[in-house]
């Protein structure tokens, strides 16, 4: 290839990435990012808030349902069906469906996001409880533990790895879905991505999409690692191999 | 040893029946038997005979349909299940150790339920681990996955013994262990039992294990019918019916040999000689012996060589005359093992020695054949045999 053409291309590239021309052509502009990164911390905070609150509420509901289903096995089918049906509602549709009821804002976003965590969490908690070795439960009962003691001291601790696996999936999923929360007026990184009013140029401005999207991915990854680390510390017995 | 050894208690099954809803026949049908205080009662039978069901009704893991089980004279149905179970040790085949708890935490399960103090629990855990020959410092903080199968089984027994319950229920506790370790664990348990005198209901499908472990054996037929309830030797010599006879096996005579020790039978006498003895005297000593040979012993009286007629043609007994006297059988050997020793060297007789190695008599095939017909009341139970 001709060296002159190559130099020209390099020049173009550099110009597009730095100058005002880069922003105008909605490209990927590192200098713009460096100047505007501070505008993203607020939405990131909102995003974290939406995710954690939805996950916490979802966990509370799913956990209660799973314990109920554990004691009354026949409930498992119906609960799975209902949470499964909720899970299949397209997320944007869910936000718009909720708007007339809960109004614009965090509440709508949180209700919708919570709904989406239910199926994952419920299924993982019930699976975890069901996979507890029957011998351990039989031995516990034979030694005189009551049903509640068996649940607290044997079944839940042994189901914890699967429960935490569910929390990890639910967390990552919720971080992703929360980017749509802005449709309901819930803010978050999605607002930065989609809305031109956010002053970032919206979805067609590559720099904006890369930063906001990148932050969402980073959030999911960091959260996942934190749960994983917590799991390793909380479950020492999972680390020991077979003798 | 626990400082407060509780007295053993009896268990009585009174027409105990378990009928599952929808099942054509009861799983256990009017089972009546009495387990004496401090005895091991083995429930044995083919699968589906209701042996596990019968055992699990003792601590109400399965509810009794009709009839009653009395522990120390009190009906189990009058007790709250959880409370009852804390007073009954429970050990099962897959052991059921909690994988998320350390050995010490596993053993401490029932003491914790009974709200013992931390110090008392720690002390008890170490005491129990020592009792089952595990080093507390080494295994206390391990998780079950870090133990061998045999160690896990021992911890399971320690956990069942945690609050020194007078009654133990054991469901095929050695079932998942390889034969060599199973034998060792069985012996260990019998030794433990000799110290602790628990009343044990022990379930197995293995008749050899039943004969070895049981003071009494209850053979159950399908549907929980009691075919025979007797001491092992009694059952082997007088099976109640065809079913029991088949179940104990065609080699039941041989199995009885496992319940006798060499010291229990009358041994033959032979004349003995030491190197340099006058042959004339040796021959005189052979007059009232049961065999036509003499035994050369060393100065401590330990058997050395058999002396035959052709070896006694000189004036005095020669050092390397005759043939090596082998194998040596110990007075404390079990008859079945002694027979094995004889068979392995194709010999019809062998010298028996005491604990110091001093000659005590001669065991022969004829004596063993005679012992096969020994009346049941002269045979021992394994738990007596195992105690040193």
Image (spheres, grey):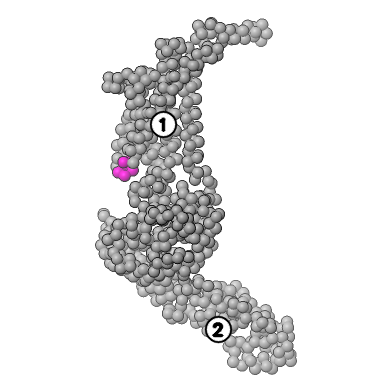
Q: Nearer the viewer, residue B343 or A220?
A: A220
Can you tell which quarter of the image residue A142 is in? bottom left
> Where A224 falls versus A185 (above or below)?
below
Looking at the picture, how far across and down is residue B349, in whole percent? Answer: 59, 80
Looking at the picture, how far across and down is residue A123, in whole percent? Answer: 37, 37
Residue A70 is a magenta residue? yes
> Where B307 falls versus B124 (above or below)?
below
**Label 2 close to label 1 by CB (< 8 Å):** no
Q: Residue at x 29, y 37 (%)?
A: A78
- The magenta segment is A68-73
Q: Are marks 2 and 1 on the same chain?
A: no
> Where B164 falls versus B101 (above or below)?
below
Which class describes the residues within 10 Å of circle 2: few (<14), some (14-19), or many (20+)? some
| Residue identified by numbered label 2 | B267
Which class describes the residues within 10 Å of circle 1: few (<14), some (14-19), or many (20+)? many
| Residue identified by numbered label 1 | A170
Residue A51 disc label: none
Q: Residue at x 53, y 78 (%)?
A: B262
Q: Chain of mark 1?
A: A
Evaluate whether residue B16 shows in this view: no
Q: Nearer the viewer, mark 2 or mark 1?
A: 1
Q: CA distance from mark 2 to mark 1?
A: 79 Å
Q: Chain of mark 2?
A: B
Looking at the picture, how far across and down is residue B274, in whole percent? Answer: 69, 86
Residue B332 is a magenta residue? no
């Amino acid at each position: 290839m001709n060296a002159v053409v190559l130099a020209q291309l390099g020049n173009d590239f550099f110009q597009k990435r730095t100058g005002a021309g880069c922003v105008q052509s909605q490209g990927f502009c590192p200098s713009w990012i460096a100047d505007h990164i501070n505008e993203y911390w607020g939405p990131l905070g909102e995003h974290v808030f939406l995710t954690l609150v939805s996950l916490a509420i979802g966990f509370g509901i799913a956990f209660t349902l799973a314990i109920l289903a554990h004691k009354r096995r026949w409930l498992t089918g119906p609960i799975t069906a209902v949470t499964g049906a909720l899970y299949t509602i397209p997320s944007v549709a869910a936000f718009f469906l909720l708007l007339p009821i809960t109004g614009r804002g965090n509440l709508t976003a949180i209700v919708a996001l919570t709904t989406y965590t239910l199926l994952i969490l419920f299924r993982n908690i019930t699976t975890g409880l069901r996979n507890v070795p029957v011998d351990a439960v039989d031995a516990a009962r034979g030694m005189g533990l009551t049903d509640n003691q068996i649940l607290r001291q044997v079944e839940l601790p042994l189901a914890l790895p699967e429960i935490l696996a569910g929390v990890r999936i639910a967390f990552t999923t919720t971080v992703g879905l929360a980017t749509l929360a802005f449709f309901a007026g819930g803010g978050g990184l999605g607002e930065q991505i989609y809305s031109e009013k956010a002053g970032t140029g919206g979805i067609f401005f590559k720099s904006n999409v890369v930063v906001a999207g990148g932050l969402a991915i980073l959030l999911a990854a960091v959260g996942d690692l934190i749960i994983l680390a917590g799991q390793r510390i909380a479950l020492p017995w999972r680390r020991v191999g077979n003798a | 040893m626990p400082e407060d050894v509780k007295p053993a208690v009896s268990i009585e099954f009174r027409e105990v029946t378990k009928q599952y809803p929808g099942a054509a026949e009861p799983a256990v049908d009017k089972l009546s038997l009495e387990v004496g205080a401090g005895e091991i009662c083995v429930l044995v039978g083919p699968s589906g005979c209701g042996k596990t069901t019968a055992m699990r009704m003792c601590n109400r893991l399965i509810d009794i349909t009709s009839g009653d089980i009395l522990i120390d004279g009190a009906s189990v149905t009058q007790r709250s299940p959880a409370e009852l179970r804390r007073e009954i040790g429970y050990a099962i085949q897959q052991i059921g150790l909690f994988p998320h708890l350390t050995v010490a935490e596993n053993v401490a399960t029932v003491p914790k339920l009974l709200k013992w103090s931390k110090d008392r629990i720690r002390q008890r855990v170490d005491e129990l681990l020592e009792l089952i020959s595990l080093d507390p410092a080494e295994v206390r903080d391990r998780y079950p996955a870090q133990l061998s199968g045999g160690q896990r089984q021992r911890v399971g027994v320690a956990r069942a013994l945690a609050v020194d319950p007078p009654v133990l229920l054991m469901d095929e506790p050695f079932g998942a262990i390889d034969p060599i370790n199973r034998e060792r664990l069985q012996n260990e348990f019998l030794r433990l039992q000799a110290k602790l005198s628990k009343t044990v209901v022990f379930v197995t499908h293995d008749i050899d294990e039943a004969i070895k472990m049981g003071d009494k054996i209850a053979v159950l037929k399908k549907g929980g019918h009691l075919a025979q309830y007797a001491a092992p030797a009694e059952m082997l010599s007088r099976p109640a019916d065809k079913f029991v006879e088949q179940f104990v096996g065609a080699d039941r005579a041989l199995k009885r040999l496992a319940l006798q020790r060499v010291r229990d039978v009358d041994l033959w006498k032979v004349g003995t000689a030491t190197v340099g003895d006058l042959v004339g005297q040796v021959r005189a000593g052979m007059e009232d012996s049961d065999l036509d040979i003499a035994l050369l012993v060393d100065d401590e009286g330990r058997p050395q060589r058999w002396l035959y007629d052709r070896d006694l043609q000189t004036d005095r007994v020669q050092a390397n005359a005759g043939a090596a006297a082998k194998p040596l059988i110990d007075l404390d050997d079990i008859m079945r093992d002694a027979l094995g020793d004889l068979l392995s060297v194709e010999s019809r007789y062998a010298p028996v020695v005491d604990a110091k190695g001093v000659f005590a008599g001669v065991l022969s095939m004829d004596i063993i054949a005679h012992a096969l017909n020994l009346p049941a009341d002269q045979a021992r139970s394994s738990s007596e045999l195992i105690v040193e």
